[in-house]
Image: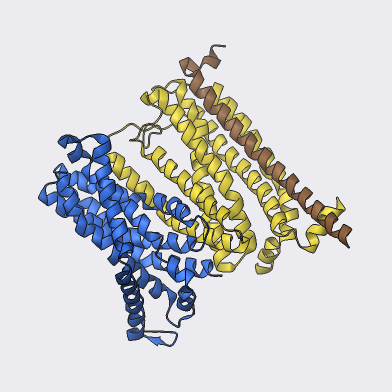
Chain colours: A yellow, B brown, C blue
Amino acid sequence: MWTFFHKLASPPHFYRLAKTLIPWFAVPGYLLLVYGTYAGLFLAPPDYQQGDAFRIIYVHVPAAYLSMMAYMILAVAGGIGLIWRMKLAHAVAASAAPIGASFTFLALATGSIWGRPMWGTWWEWTDPRLMSELILLFLYFGYMALRGAIDDTAKADKASAVLALVGAVNVPIIHFSVEWWSSLHQGPTLVREGGPAMDTAMLYPLLAMIFGFTFVFGAMLLRRIRTEVLHRERRTRWVKDLVLAD
Amino acid sequence: MDKLAMGGYGVYVWSCFGLTLAIVIVNEWRARHRHRIELRDIEVRIKAMEARQ
Amino acid sequence: MTVGNVTTPGLIAGLLGTAQRDLLLVWKRPGDVLNPLFFFAMVCTLFPLAVGPSVEQLEFAGPGVLWVAALLAMLLSLNSLFLSDFEDGSLEQLLLSPQPLVLLALGKTFAHWLTSGLPLVILSPLLAVAFRMPGETIGVLMATLALGTISLSLLGSVGAALTVGLHRGTALLSLLTLPLAMPVLIFGARTVSLAASGDLYSMGIYALAAYAVGALSLAPFATAAALRISNE
């Protein structure tokens, strides 16, 4: 078991493994996205209240879900890197941050565009989810700024891991506090919780989009980790051999 | 054509999907581009070191 | 209780010793305490100047303005929490001391709260009166500020420890700490608003107290880890 982990964590091995893994994530991911987009836009029936505007759910919800998942990956990888001094885990955390931030931005932008026809405003302050998402984006900015401000890679890894862990502990509290804050003014929300069960014709495309985006995220993450590993190992023998072999 | 208008919400729906496509493309492109740059930088450094020897 | 070869009285002495040393340093440089206080008072003055002097608006905006100003003043004072110790090398001495670093970090954070959080709590009624806050609400304001500034000192000590010794650390410190501080701001300011409008506000006080307890038990460990990393 442990030898497996040690082998997995060895940079040259992971570098090769990631290359073979990427198509296994990318191909099913993009196929699911193509199906989900087509079915979501054309096959699913319009919502009885929101009409065709509800179709934004097919990009908004996966983006919001990925934004949270990427932050969790960031924090867990940072924690593993701190506790077991595993360099690969820090490379994972460093790679997850920009992708996570871009999906957080996407969740905010699509939420805002969706809000325009539904609420009549681009930004509805009483929606707790959009507010949490905005604070999450600030957390990503802080994380990336701290990484960028420290020149020494090992030091940047550890410092940003501490920040990510503190942030991860705070994320549920932020969510709770924003929910409480907005509950004082009864406001409308985009995604209803505990509402009428979704029709399967609406639900299947959503599931396809969520799984599709997860796989595509995996492929993007693996690609970035490869670059990160290469950069961190640029002075080693195996990288030299690898580059000269091409 | 009727379907593309999305019951009057076409602008909102299509801009959301378009933005999503753009973000996916930018992410994929950035990842590939950075990898190429990294490989090239390492190669340049190795060549420079060999030239010095 | 024994940690390493230091006994319990030794541990407490270490915590109080660090706090006492920091308080003594502040006594010699009172500007470190006074500047954030002046800043707090000035930000509170800016809002009526920008929004207009109508009493209704002031009553409405008061809790939020006082809380945002307090948060910014806390941020301002955080920058110097570890900076002078880092520059004169006494931070390295702390890291080498036989005392557990967690307690020393807690001692420094405690001194920071005494010199920046507590003065804000004491000054706040003066500004609250200017915002036409009724007496009972001022009590709630002071309670939320007391609990909230404890959390902010603890949370901020993590950020200060992470950014100590970095170029442009001040801007970075705000960028790191502000999003984390938002729950404290929400609970603090909303609780005072609820109290001002005569609604039930106990929930906010409980949330602030729970946050402070949580921060007290977790943040010193993060601060200690961050100090070790920053001094590598």
Q: Position of residue A58 (x, y in %)?
A: 51, 31
Q: How many marks?
A: 0
Nearer-the-camera pick, C90 or A3: C90
Residue drawn at (46%, 81%) of the image: C97
Residue drawn at (66%, 52%) of the image: A225
Residue C105, quarter of the rendered image: bottom left
Q: Quadrant of the N terminus of chain A?
A: bottom right
Residue A208 seen by the camera: yes
Residue C10, quarter of the rendered image: bottom left
Nearer-the-camera pick, A141 or A48: A141
Left or right of A152 in this view: A237: right
Nearer-the-camera pick, A240 or C91: C91
Q: Position of residue C120 (x, y in %)?
A: 25, 57
Seen as rendered, the residue at the extreme left is C135
Residue drawn at (55%, 55%) of the image: A149
Nearer-the-camera pick, C107 or C167: C167
Left or right of A181 in this view: C159: right
Q: Position of residue C69 (x, y in %)?
A: 29, 49
Seen as rendered, the residue at the extreme top is B1
Residue A62 seen by the camera: no
Q: Is residue A78 above or below residue A201?
A: below
Q: Position of residue C167 (x, y in %)?
A: 53, 57
